[in-house]
Amino acid sequence: MSTFQLDDCKLFILSEQIELEVSKVAAQINRDYKGKSPLLIGVLNGVFFAADLMKRLDLDCELTINNLFGMLKKANSIEVATLLYKPDKYKFDLPIKHVGFEAGNKFVVGYGLDYNGRGRNYKDIYVLTD
């Protein structure tokens, strides 16, 4: 098992910068979906980002498990928002509409992202240096 420590990292993105970008993305989604009821789904490591977005959206995003699948089948559009974009890793046809930061090929920890189960709860995002 790894002996990962914060000393193995350098600061990449401050929590204040994360909050600012989440607010910007939320404002854009609020404008794009004004008067509509979007379905927001957080996926795996992006769940921290999705949860912070949901806190800031001024939209009716009520959802029950009973109507989840029906909503997905009837979706007029599907859009992707990501806090950290790695262009070399994203190999899908669906374009990313909202990007917070480009992370290149950096291995990052914090804000829900971990290294062998560690670092997930850091408020800032760090780059693993070795």
Image: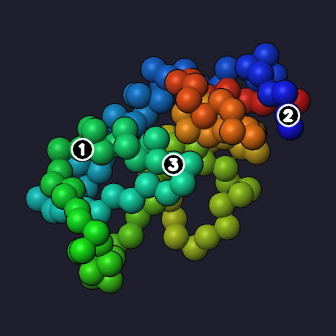
Q: Quadrant of residue 64 in the image? A: bottom left
Residue located at (43% from left, 34% from top): 21
Query: Earlier along the polypeptide chain: callout 1 or callout 2?
Result: 2
- Label 2 Cα crowd, 10 Å radius (few <14 / some 14-19 / many 20+): few
Q: Is residue 61 above or below residue 12?
A: below
Disc 1 marks which amino acid?
Answer: Leu
Q: Is residue 52 above or below residue 15?
A: below
Residue located at (69% from left, 39% from top): 117
Depth order, front residue of 97/9:
9
Q: CA distance from mark 2 to mark 3?
A: 23 Å
Residue located at (73% from left, 19% from top): 6
Which x, y percent locates residue 29?
A: 29, 50
- Label 1 Cα crowd, 10 Å radius (few <14 / some 14-19 / many 20+): some
Disc 2 marks which amino acid?
Answer: Ser
Q: Mark 1 = which residue?
A: 57
Q: Mark 3 = which residue?
A: 46
Of the 4 image quadrants, the one containing the C terminus is: top right
